[in-house]
Image (spheres, rainbow, N blue to C red):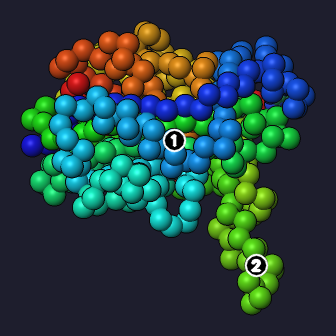
C-alpha cells in the first residue's frame, strides 16, 4: 500500500503567550512592523518545558485521539533541531515517557522542513511493511537558540510541538524532498562545543563549512531565505501535484510551514489558488520551525477543515536550505 492515513493528531504549546508589545520591551521593534512584515501577533515561549516534554504532551494527545492501542506503535520518528540531549534522541525520550516498548525510535534534522521529511520516512516504512503504525512528531524549543537582543530574528520564533499517528492506506501519496545546500550559510545556528585541550581555534575556523558566529544562536539572512521560500514553496507543491497527475486546484487544503504570512500569500498567488486554501495560524504561534506543520495540522483537523478523501498538501522550507512537500488523501 503506497498511501498513508493520519488516524490521530495532537499538539502542545507552552502557556506563556508573548505579544509583539512584549517583544518591544526587549528590542527596538513594534507591533506594526512585526505584524505587517510577518503576520505574527504573538508566540508561545517555553517557561522551562524541555523539547521532549512538549513532544510527549503532543504525543499523549494524539494517542488519546487514536482508536487503537499505544502498543501498536512500532516506529517513532521525531523531527527537531532543538533536542534536549545529543543522545538519547527526543524520539527515545517519548518512547520512555509513554512506555512505547519495542518501537524503532530516532530523530531527523531537516529544520523547518523536518516534519515533511519525518512523515516521508514513515511512509517508506509503512509502504514496505517494515512498520504498521508510526508516531510522527516535531517538537522545537527555538527560544533556546534565539538571541533575544537581535530584533531581526527574535520576533519571529516560537516554541511548540505537534504529533500524529500514521498507518498505511491504499489512498494516493506523492512527495518531493530536496536541499539547496550551497546556500546553507544563509540560515544556521552553531553548536558551541567547548574546545578540547587539543583543538586550535584557527584549525576549527578553517575546517568549518563556512564562516560563522559561533554563539549557538540562529543567524539568518532574511531576504535570501525569503527569496528561496517564495520559489521553493510553490515549486515543490507543483512538482508533487505533477507526480500524482493532478493540478494544484485539486488540493483541498495546503498546510504550509508558518514562517511568514507574506511568503504564503506569494506562493498561493503563484499557484493560482485563493489564500484561504492554505491553513494559517502564524498570528498566534510565530515560526515554530518543524513543529509548525503538525501544530497547524492538528488545529485544522479539530476545526473540521480536512474533509475525508480530500487531498492535503504539507509543505515545508527552511535551513539547509531544505524543502519538502507531501501530498496524500485525508
Ligand atoms: O523558518 C525558516 C524560514 N525563514 C523564513 O522563511 C524567513 C524569511 N524571511 C522573512 O520572513 C523576512 O525577510 C523577515 C521577516 C525576516 C524580514 O522582513 P523584510 O521585509 O525582509 O525586512 P528586512 O530584513 O529587509 O529589514 C527591513 C528593515 C531594516 O531596516 P533598514 O535597514 O531598512 O533601516 C531592518 O533593520 O527593518 C529593520 N528591522 C526591524 N525593524 C523593526 C529588522 N527587524 C526589525 C524589527 N523591528 N523586529
Secondary structure type for disc 2: loop
Instruction: Count neighbours of disc 2 (C-alpha within 10 A) and say few if under 14, some if 14 to 19, many if 20 or more.
Output: few
Residue 293: tell me if it is visible: no
Closer to the camera in the image, 313 or 234: 313
Q: Residue at x 81, y 80 (%)?
A: 202
Closer to the camera in the image, 327 or 73: 73
Q: Residue at x 39, y 26 (%)?
A: 297
On the picture, is 87 further left or further right than 202?
A: left
Task: Find residue 146 and name its label.
Answer: none
The quadrant in which the C terminus is found is top left
Residue wearing tag 2: 195
Tell me where residue 94 appears, x and y as whole percent. Answer: 41, 51
Quadrant hosting residue 298: top left
Tell me where residue 152 appears, x and y as whole percent. Answer: 79, 35
Image vertical order of residue 38 relative to residue 94, above or below:
above
Cβ of mark 2 under 8 Å from ligand 1: the answer is no
Dividing the image into four quarters, tell me where ligand 1 lies.
top right
On the picture, is 220 further left or further right than 228?
A: right
Image vertical order of residue 57 relative to residue 298, above or below:
below
Residue wearing tag 1: 54
Tell me where residue 287 appears, x and y as whole percent. Answer: 60, 32
Amino acid at each position: 500500500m503506497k498511501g498513508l492515513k493520519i488516524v490521530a493528531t495532537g499538539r502542545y504549546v507552552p502557556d506563556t503567550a508573548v505579544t509583539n508589545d512584549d517583544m518591544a520591551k526587549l528590542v527596538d521593534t513594534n507591533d506594526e512592523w512585526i505584524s505587517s512584515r510577518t503576520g505574527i501577533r504573538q508566540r508561545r515561549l517555553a517557561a522551562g518545558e524541555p523539547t521532549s516534554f512538549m513532544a510527549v504532551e503532543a504525543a499523549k494527545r494524539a494517542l488519546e485521539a487514536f482508536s487503537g492501542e499505544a502498543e501498536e506503535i512500532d516506529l517513532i520518528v521525531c523531527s527537531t533541531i532543538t533536542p534536549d540531549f545529543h543522545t538519547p534522541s527526543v524520539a527515545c525520550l517519548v518512547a520512555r515517557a509513554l512506555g512505547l516498548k519495542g518501537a524503532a525510535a530516532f530523530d531527523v534534522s531537516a529544520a523547518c522542513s523536518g516534519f515533511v521529511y519525518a512523515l516521508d520516512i514513515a511512509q517508506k516504512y509503512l509502504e514496505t511493511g517494515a512498520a504498521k503504525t508510526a508516531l510522527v512528531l516535531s517538537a522545537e524549543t527555538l527560544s533556546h537558540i534565539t538571541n533575544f537582543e537581535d530584533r531581526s530574528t527574535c520576533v519571529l520564533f516560537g516554541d511548540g510541538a505537534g504529533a500524529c499517528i500514521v498507518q498505511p492506506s491504499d489512498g494516493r501519496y506523492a512527495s518531493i524532498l530536496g536541499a539547496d545546500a550551497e546556500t546553507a550559510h544563509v540560515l544556521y545556528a552553531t553548536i558551541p562545543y567547548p574546545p578540547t585541550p587539543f583543538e586550535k581555534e584557527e584549525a576549527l575556523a578553517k575546517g568549518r563549512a563556512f564562516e560563522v558566529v559561533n554563539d549557538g544562536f540562529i543567524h539568518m539572512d532574511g531576504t535570501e531565505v525569503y527569496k528561496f521560500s517564495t520559489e521553493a514553496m510553490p515549486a515543490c507543491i507543483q512538482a508533487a501535484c505533477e507526480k500524482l497527475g493532478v493540478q494544484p486546484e485539486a488540493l483541498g487544503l495546503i498546510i504550509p510551514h508558518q514562517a511568514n504570512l507574506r511568503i504564503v500569500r506569494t506562493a498561493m498567488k503563484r499557484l493560482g489558488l485563493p489564500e484561504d486554501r492554505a491553513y494559517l495560524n502564524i498570528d498566534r504561534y510565530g515560526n515554530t520551525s518543524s513543529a509548525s506543520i503538525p501544530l497547524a495540522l492538528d488545529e485544522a483537523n479539530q476545526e473540521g477543515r480536512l474533509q475525508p478523501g480530500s487531498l492535503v498538501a504539507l509543505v515545508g522550507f527552511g535551513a539547509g536550505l531544505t524543502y519538502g512537500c507531501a501530498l496524500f488523501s485525508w
